[in-house]
Structure formats: C-alpha cells, structure tokens
Image (cartoon, helix red, strand yellow):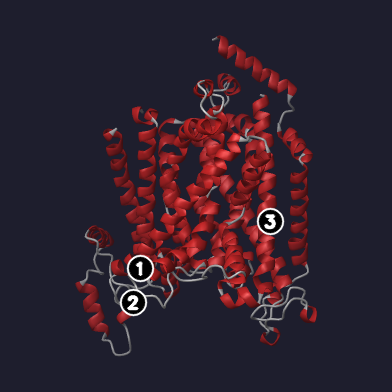
Amino acid sequence: MWKTVLRRILIMIPQLLILSLLVFILAKMMPGDPFTGMINPNSDPKEIARLRQEYGLNDPVWVQYTRWLGNMFHGDLGQSYIQKVPVTSLIWDRAVNTFWLSLMTVVLTYVIAIPLGVTAGRHQDEWQDHGVQIFNYITFAVPPFVFYILGIWLFGFTLGWFPISGSVSADVNPGTLAYFWSRIYHLILPSILCALISTTTIVQYLRTGIVDNKVEDYVRTARSKGVPENVVFNKHILRNSLLPIAAFFGNTITGLLSGSMVIESVFSYPGMGKLFLDSIGQRDYTTLTALILLFGVLTLVGNLLSDIIMSIIDPRIRIK
Amino acid sequence: MAKDKNTSKKDQNAKTSLPPSGFKIIVREVWRDKVAFVSFCIIVAILLFTFVGSLFLNKSQVTEINIAEAYYAWGESGHVFGTDDGGRDILKLLMMGGRNSILIGLSVTVLCEGVGLLVGLFSGYFGGVTDAVIMRIVDFIQILPQFPIIIVLTTVIPNYNAWTLVLLISMFGWTSTARYFRAFVLSQREREYVLASKTSGSSNLTIMFREVLPNITSALVIDVVLMIAGNIGIETTLSFLGYGLPTTTPSLGTLIGFANDPVNVTTRPWLWMPATILLLIISLSINYVGRALQRAGDARQREN
C-alpha cells in the first residue's frame, strides 16, 4: 500500500519538473520583465539596466531557470507588475474564495448525482430512468457557460432570487452571522449550476454499477434473508457501486479548478479563475505565470489523489 | 484452444452476416431512431442557415461599425434580431458567427482525429517501449491546465488569427483521440486477420492502414461527431471569455459574451439570447446524433 503511494509520488517529480520547465518557457515568451513596470519618463535607463544585471536577467537561460525554480520552492512567486504586491498574497485571498466555491460544488455534485444514479439504476428502463437519462444527456451536451448564462439570467436577473456578482455583500461586517450568511447566499446559485452540470460521469457510472450489481448473488442472499428493498439498494448495492465513483473525487477537484475560470467570470466571483482573467487583461505576467504553475500543480495533485484513492479501494491496482 | 476455435468461427460468422463495413448497419439504426433523425434534420437546417446565409454576406460589411444604428431592438427598422453596440445586424453576425464556430470545430476535429489516429495506430500496433513513451506524453498533456495555457498563448503569439486558434486547441485535443484509438487497435492486434496478414508477409504499414484501419472506421465516425460538438464548445467558451477568435471575426461565443454585461442581460436580450439558443440547439443535436451512433455501434459489437 505505502509502496504504491510512494512510487506514485516519485512519478510526480519528473512531471513537476517538466511542468515547471513549460511554465518557465511560457513566462519567457511573455513580453517584459519584472522591471518593465518601473519604466516611466523619469526613470534612468542605466538604473534599469543595472537592476536587470543585479537580478540576473542577463544570465544564461538555464541559470535563470534554476534560480526561478529555487524561488518557487521557497514560496517566492515574485511581485505583481500591476498591483505592486507579492503574488502570493494576491493569490491567497482568491484561492480561499475558489476553495469555498469548489467545496460547495463538490458536495452538491455528489448530493445531486447519487440519488439520481441510484434511482436510474433501480428503476432501469422505467420512466424514472428515462428522465435521469435525458437530464444526463443535457448536462453532457450543453457547454457549461451556456448553462451558467441561462441560469444567471433566469434566477439572478429575471426572478431576482440570488445575487448576480461578488462573493459577499458590501454592507455586512466580517465576523458577524450576517456576513457568513451573505457569503453562503452568494455561493448558492453558482455552486448549484456548477454541480448540476458536473454530475454526468458520476450518474452514468453509478447507474451502470447498480444495474450490474442488482443481479449479483449477494443481493439475492440479502433479499432472501428478508432485508427490506430500500435497505438492499441504499446499503448493499450502493456501497458496492460507490467504489468507482470515489476515484473521481480527485478528478472532480481538477475539473473544478479548470472550470473555475468560466463560472467565476459569469458570476464575477473573485476567485483564482477571475484573477487569471483579470491578470491577462492587465498583462500582469508574474501573476499569470504563478497561476498557471499553481493550476498545473493542483491538477497533478488531483490526479495523485485519484490514483491513491483507487489503490486503496481496488487492491488489484496495488499488486500491479 | 477450444476457446480460440470458437472465437474464430464467430468472427467468420460475423464477417459473412455483416457487410464489409458495419457502418451501414449503424446508419440504419440511427435512421430508425426518430429523435436522432429529427436532430439530424436540425443540423442540416442549421448548416444551411449559417453556410448558405453567409454566402450572401460580406465580412467587412457585416462587421462594419455604424454607431448611428446601435442597439436597435428586435425587429426595429428591418433588423430582425436588432443590432449590437456597433450597429451591426445580429442576424447576420449570427449566420457568420455560427459558420465560423462550426468551421473551427470541424477544423480542430480533422486535425485532432488525423494526428490522434496516426499516433493511436502506431502506439497500439507496436506496443512495448514506443507505446509506453507515447502514452506517458499523452498522459502529461492531458493533465496540463488547457484553458489557462491556451489563453496565455493567444495573447503572446504574434499575428494571432483563426488558424492559430485551431492549432492551439488541437495541441491538447489530439490526446484523447490517440488514447481512444490506441485502446481499439490494442484489441485488434492479436486478432487472426492481423496475424494472418503478418504471416503472409505484409509490411507493418500495410497491415495498419489496409487491414486494421478499415475495422475502426465506425469508431472513427462516432468519435468525429462527438468531437465536433466538443470542439465547438471549447472555441465558443474561449471566445466567450474574450480569448478565442479575434474580435474582428464573429463567433457565437463572442455574441454570447455580450451577456457579461449586466445591462445587456436585463435590457438587451436580443444581443446574446439568439446566439445562446443557437449554440444550445447545435450542441444538443450534434451530441444526440453522436450518442445514437454510439449506441448503434455498441449494439453492433454486441451482435458480434
């Protein structure tokens, strides 16, 4: 068990290195350097050149790369060109916001998907199943942003049930109950929309799992012992069908991070995705580089989690 | 041994009872599915609307800015869907934008399927070290954050245009196709027709392209249809965020992007609503046909 996990983590090291190399190349392709922001009519070109020399921007590329990598390990992601603050502090607030949105979305995804999958599997080929299949087809086919736009238009603007932008109202003070409620209130619509559209794979796998498990011997045994039908489905069968879904957990997180850009843009929600889009609009390249690296690392970690969860659940993977 | 004989007999049976390509059967299945047939008709109608409609339009004329006519509502002074902030006719933008989005989706798909098919064929057929190396590369590309990288590249690449966008999206898109076909070829490479061809001295290339490839054509068609829908989604999402097609080229995503402004959402629904609905219909119908093809393909495999 631990061997598998250890080996899986070791595989991640070259992946991280290649990722960092790619991000570094991408960063070098972006115009400007950390001192471009200081240039103004009064600045002395010689002074800028001296700073460039001092900070090693004239060194060979690979020396710059190793230094950059070293800084990353110390948690130094550089200074933002535009905001003139360390990138780490800029990202931190946004990361917290994205975390809450993602957490709520993950919870809601499972809360919506599991009953749907169970119903569809239990009533295979009946009207409930057909209903779920249609729902599942729509979530599969429709591009998420179209779904979000229609959602915010209907529930945010037309019906006015939910706020349409931001993460908290301006008129509440941090620390109060009203503040907490306002944050939750701002999360409800985006997370429900996000969750609805992310259920596709989970519902599909759960349905297939239940349909397959329904005819197994252990189910017949449970039934013949007189276990009530609801318990057979909700305990015996569900538990066995949940296994493949648990493995999606890591991937779900990954998907949310990459999708955060779209949902945060539609709801003007101040998270990492919105920060990325704002930074690209302002050409804030240090922040962009840091964010891409962060997105990449988080994706790798999500994949790692998935694999580890899989190896815990399914012993066959461990043996290999 | 006995099992081997059984399967070979089964294969022969399948060959005699089926036409050379199982594709006809799949088409027949989809034909019978009424919803799939209706979806197919809708796709044809949309293609006619966007492509034939665009034939009568001149790009520079459509995208010409005429502030005096800005923000006409539905049906005002001859503009069926009104006009946008630059006085451009939404109906015309819709035709051209729809055509551009569909064309981008098609081009990306052709490129991805081409590269993916070749890589998948080689990887699956040769196996071993070749396969291991290729698959590690595919794995790695698939875990890269696709959208952030594409968006950054769109802003740093000089002379950025629609074709650059196609290349950028394809850079990530081919991996899933390669994986899909690799799995398919892996299942074929130990089949008797491949072994027989090998014994009779055919070269690897001949076997790959003359023997194995025809057997995966139906899988190819299904993948192409589903992928077109997916790629239209990617392009419109990027354009919606403002980093897809250049602003001078109309796209459904750019039109839907008008909804980023709260004023437009509430008071000028004609700007974004038609494009949203058109994209919704395109996605739903293409995907439905794809799913129907998939089901028919699965059914054919079960028969074998």
Tell me the chain of label 1. A
Near-viewer residue (A117 or B116): A117
Position of residue B4 relative to residue B32, above or below, is above
Marks 1 and 2, how far apart in space?
A: 10 Å
N-term mark: 1 or 2 = 2
Q: Residue at x 42, y 75 (%)?
A: A282
Asked if residue B304 shows in the view, the reply is yes
Image-based side of A302 in relation to B202, left or right: left
Residue most toward the top?
A: B2
Evaluate whether label 1 is on the same chain as label 3. Answer: no
The percent coordinates of residue B45 (x first, y second) are 78, 56
Residue at image point 28% right, 68% down? A78
Kindly state the secondary structure of the residue where label 3 is placed: helix
Pointer 1 residue: A287
Secondary structure type for disc 1: helix
In space, the residues marked 2 and 3 are separated at their CA atoms by: 42 Å
Tell me if I can see residue B163 in this picture.
no
Q: Which corner quadrant holds the C terminus of chain B?
A: top right
- Residue type at tag 2: Gln
Whether labels 2 and 3 belong to a single chain: the reply is no
* Quadrant placement of the N terminus of chain B: top right
- Give me the disc on residue A83: 2
> Which disc number belongs to residue B35?
none
Give the residue type that dot 1 points to. Answer: Thr
Dot 2: few (<14), some (14–19), or many (≥20) neighbours within 10 Å? few
What residue lies at 64% left-to-right and 33% top-to-bottom? B298
Toward which corner of the image does residue B20 lie, by quadrant? Answer: top right
